[in-house]
Amino acid sequence: MNEKRLNKKLFRSIVICLGIAATILMVWFGVLSMMNDSLNEMMSEQMETEAREYRRRITRQIDKDFQTLHTLSAFFTCEDVTKSDDFDDSLCRANQNNNFIGMAYFGMDGTGTMVQKENGMKTQMDYRELNEMVQGIMEKAYRGEPALSDLFDSTIVSDRIFVYALPVFDEQKNVMGVLSAGNNVETFEEVLASDRVINGTGSVSLVNEEGEVLLSLSENDDPDIVKELFESSLDEEEEQKDAESLLGTVRKEEGIYTHLDCGKREYHVYLTPVKVNGWYVMCINSRGHGNYVANQMVNTLGSVFLMLLVLILSLLICICHMIAKNNKNLTELAYQDALTGADNLLRFQGNLTAVRKMENQFCLVILNVHQFKFVNEIFGVKEANRFLCNIAGGIEEHLGEEEFFCRESGDNFYLYLKEDDERVIRDRIEALMDDICITMVDEKVDYQILLYAGAVLYDERDGVLSNELLITRARFATKYCKMLPGEFLHFYDEEIHKSEEMENYVETHMHQALEREEFQLFLQPKMDLEDGSLGGAEALVRWVPEDRDIIYPGAFIPQFERNGFCVQLDMYMAEMVFKQIRAWMDEGISPIPISVNQSKLMFFDAHYIRFMADLVEKYQVPANLITLEILEGLALEHAKELNRKLERLREMGFRISMDDFGSGYASFNTLANLEIDELKLDRSFLLEMSEEKGGRYARIMGNIINLAKSMGIVTVTEGVERAEDEELIRNLGCDYGQGFLYSKPISAEEFTRRYMR
């Protein structure tokens, strides 16, 4: 990317940023509008909740008072009680024991007795002389229906009250009189004023269906809002129709939310019917008053946002100016390695893309320093950096026209060579390495620098490969070269390709294969050398994918040991062994012991012992039918901890076998330190029994077998492939033989058919 293109992109970025800023500003105004709508919606929901709560309180108070009257009326169902001499006194006592300000009982002739807590008792009263509203509810009660009056100004108690009337029935369910009670307006005032309305910014009122305010409590700044809305507004014919329409609508619903204008202010109004006498609970709040704090917060946030936007735009302009001013320096920093001054990988990939459009064949090489970490550790970072700079200088001297290189990181150098002949490339790389090493010697550095490289040839006829794939293949070749002793350059070939494919397949399919049970149980028999009978079997794993040929353990076990997946595989295989033995037992087949390999990671897993115990309990298989095979290397590294776990496993009934004894650093001390039941001699003993060494190895093998027998340890020899091998180990006293002479590993199904029927 050149400077002109960078400036063009920079200008485009500024325009985009300004556009984004304008968009954000528009979105913010939209958000403010949405927030305002949300606040109004929250206000309506709050008003609805509070209005319905007040309605519930009012109806609960009315129901409570009617329930009290119902309870008292039970004492008047007997005619003798109402005509008794102490009836008036009973009525007085009843009045004193409740919250009513007064009570009265009227017979069928319309006359009766009234008692009041403040004015005492009045007898021979006629209800037809009382307030017209009271007369109405009394007549309704005489017809057998409970009734409640509206609030009215009483001349008897000089207060604003409401009256209940309840018919009293005789035993034949005929009306024999009316029991009434009164209460003052303070009862409802306490109900409505028990909480702050809309956090103290609104008011609640009780109104009738004509729009008359029966009761109004207000804690806001304008206590006359209700009167102005439902009284003053009725003077105008059009507004009267609006109010009547509003009340008519709310009668049919649980409640209605609306806005009303009063003077210069707009109010939120919520009406809900009490369903008693045509009463309504009305909750009122000034629009913007209830959510004043929230509105202020929104406005403040808007101001802060604008300030931040201006600040960000200012900083953006300043930064863009600085970037434009230092464009050249930034370009160098973006594409140059700071240590060596060579190109970095980003520039290298850009150049590689460009030459691929013109060149059909070339070579990509990755050059590394062998054990470069030791250079850092022995000579220090400063000296190591000098080495890297010398390597970069040497590479530059050996490049031809239109060839280029880069340093990625550490000691990784990438070279593009306009060559397609392996011999020529090998000669050029060897000459380059010699010159670099000579330079180090000339500098009198007391350290032998060794270099190695991996290369991949690009041929357009083989298909267009991406830069990433070319580099990946070169890395694989470099990795492969590092493992080959004496090799300084290795080309990516079919063998590496297959290895790369297999490694990738194993890594990406192992979990899926475990879920699909593609890891299958194979068994190889162990033969009793004394009588030639079947003495047991070893469990081996084979990966049988759905989409390719069988994969043998050597292709995936090492990778599983590196990535830790071997623990899951070992658990799976152990359960497969238990399941197979259980299947034999269920079919009535006498089972044989099966040995199963246990990896180092599996053996030291925190849940290993519990897992094995659970398998025994789950499948109800005797633990002595399972032999757990461990490697001798495990015993050498963790003898004490290993012994503790072996002891617990042997207590559970499991048998322990040491596998591949003699393949590594086996010693007789290992046998002394570990409690094992079986010793498997590695196949290397039989392989080494050549004419020159046969006698010596036979004596060593015989002594090991005799020592194991003296300790009560069963011996098994692996790799028995010839009849001569079998005869030899039988004469040496070995107990069991295992190898291709008897059978290769076969599937559990075939093993069952061949050996267990």
Image: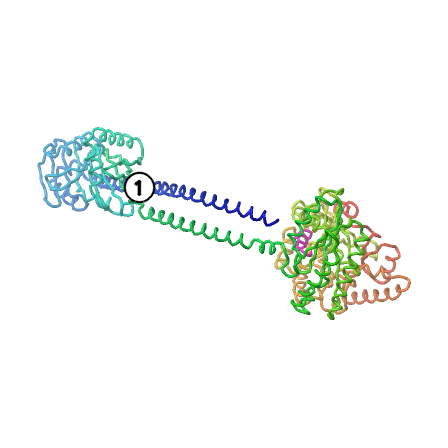
Residue located farthest toward the right when viewing the structure as drawn:
691
Question: Is any atom of residue 540 visible in this view?
Answer: no
In terms of image quadrants, where is residue 150? top left
Q: Which of the 4 quarters of the picture holds residue 446?
A: bottom right
Nearer the observer, 706 or 573: 573
Task: Name the spot of residue 656 as percent of width and height, x first.
Answer: 71, 60
- x%, y% of residue 691? 91, 62
- Residue 125: x percent and y percent? 9, 36
State the predominant SS element of the stretch in magenta.
helix
Residue linked to disc 1: 47
* Viewer-closest of 680 and 16: 16
For label 1, count other residues whose C-alpha is less than 10 Å away and answer few (under 14), some (14-19) or many (20+). Answer: many
Q: Is residue 555 above or below residue 658?
A: above
- Residues shaded magenta: 561-574
Magenta-colored stretch includes residue 567: yes
Residue 654 shows in this picture:
yes
Looking at the picture, the colour scheme in use is rainbow
Q: Secondary structure at mark 1?
A: helix
Q: Is residue 732 above or below residue 100?
A: below
Indicate whether 177 appears above or below 411: above
State which quadrant residue 728 falls in.
bottom right
Residue type, mark 1 in image: Met
User: Residue 86 magenta-drawn?
Assistant: no
Question: Compared with residue 51, is residue 576 higher up or lower down, i.e. above or below?
Answer: below
Q: How far from the left and from the top, in percent, is residue 510?
A: 67, 49
Count of all numbered marks drawn on residues in the image: 1
11 relative to 264 in the view: left or right: right
| Nearer to us in this view, 471 or 567 | 471
Q: Nearer the viewer, residue 626 or 384?
A: 384
